[in-house]
Image (tube, helix red, strand yellow):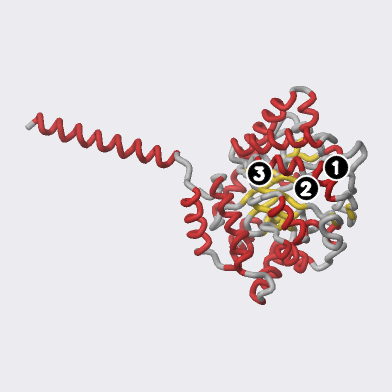
Amino acid sequence: MKKYLRIIISLVLAITLVFVSTSVAYAKREMTEEEIDARVEEILKGMTYKQRVAQMLYVFAPIGKAKAEQEKYQYGGYLLFADFFKNNNKKNVKRVIKDWQSVSKVNLLIGVDEEGGTVVRVSKFKQYRKTPFKAPKDVYKNGGYAAVEKDAHERAKLLKSLGINTNFAPVADVAYKKGNYIYNRSFSTNYKKVSKFVKCTVNAYNEDNLVSIMKHFPGYGGNGNTHTYVIKDTRSLETFEGRDLKPFAAGIKNGAPMILVNHDIVSCIDKKNTASLSKKVHKYLRKNMGFEGVIITDALGMSGVTKKVSNNGEAAVLAVLAGNDMLCTPYGKTSRDAIYKALKSGRIKKEQVNDSVRRILKMKIKYGIIK
């Protein structure tokens, strides 16, 4: 009897070990594309069209009421600025972001501009890092591309430790000379160096499961500041293709998940509309450059847009019609209501919204934002 009991116990233990090891292996393995697509359709099916529209909005986080608004509107992302971090601390930042996620039916993209150098939202405050992150070109001077990649990993580690899953970086613009608006934020005036920097940064962020947003497509070059002015870029397409678009191509090749489109009027592609509101520019990015990820506008509160289209709701509608999957906007409810109205009237097609939301959900799954 004891002999049979030992055999039974041994069999039970063996079966248990096989089950546990199989479960662990299954949990660790990556989902196939088919499984991801099926999960996307499952989530999409459970969303109302108001929620689908809201998923396309990367809203300036309304601090103080962000949890309540997220519970009500179900936005796709929240963008944070330095004021949120200034009189805060690591523990509280993490808690607040967790609260926002707790009321999200689909987890939020939580983003910042942590480029290094002149644009740092988090590391400028000592409670998060002893010293602010340096500009990538300064990091390169002291250690080459290996140092640039290490620096990107350190940024990813800091952001993720706070619950931030997206960085509005790298800057893929190629400035022409010192004094250009984008010069201090640009890695180099040499497109080959910028391309290699973009490759290093995108790869580092992908390894760390941090969503990167390449910006500012199709490249500022020597142009002015669209935060303040309407800018008309008169360069030729040959110039763009031979120089400014090269770093974006490098990012696309290395799996950049998102690209941000600027507010310049790029005359060689579209003489009338800002790039962010141009169907032709978005078509070029999709067809000519083969980008299949998520396209997002630069902030729709910038003068480059508002001086062209004064109605904020209409600007949001035009941004969707142009082909943006997400809108970076300080006007959350206004944008949502205007897009939903255009959707109900047939001005915006349901299939376009669905395709955009599919891309967003797919990215969120791949980066572990949707568990």
Which numbered disc, 1 or 3, marks the residue closer to the eye? 3
Q: Which residue is pictured at 48% across the width and 59% down the height?
A: 42
Percent from the top left, x then y, of residue 183?
86, 39
Q: Looking at the image, which is closer to me, 348 or 303?
A: 348
* Local SS, label 3: loop
Q: Which residue is mark 3?
A: 256
* Local SS, label 1: loop
Q: Is any part of residue 91 visible from this angle?
A: no
Residue at the extreme left of the image, as rendered: 1
Label annotation for residue 182: 1
Q: Is any part of residue 286 visible from this angle?
A: yes
Find out whether the residues at labels 1 and 2 contact each other: C-beta distance under 8 Å: yes
Residue 3 left/right relative to 11? left
Between discs 2 and 3, the one toward the N terminus = 2
Question: Amino acid type of disc 1?
Answer: Ile
Q: Looking at the image, which is closer to me, 89 or 179?
A: 179
304 relative to 259, above or below: below
Task: Tell me how far mark 1 sits from mark 3, CA to CA.
Answer: 21 Å
Q: How would you rate the neighbour count of disc 3 (Cα within 10 Å): few for under 14, some for 14-19, many for 20 or more? A: many
* Local SS, label 2: strand
Label annotation for residue 295: none
Find out whether the residues at labels 1 and 3 contact each other: C-beta distance under 8 Å: no
Q: Which residue is pictured at 10% across the width and 29% down the height?
A: 3
6 relative to 243, above or below: above
Q: Looking at the image, which is closer to me, 18 or 189?
A: 189
Q: Which residue is pictured at 89% across the width and 49% down the height?
A: 235
Label annotation for residue 216: 2
Percent from the top left, x then y, of residue 157?
62, 34
Percent from the top left, x then y, of residue 131?
75, 30
Task: Tell me how far mark 2 sits from mark 3, CA to CA.
Answer: 13 Å
Question: Amino acid type of disc 3?
Answer: Ala
Residue at the extreme front of the image, as rendered: 238
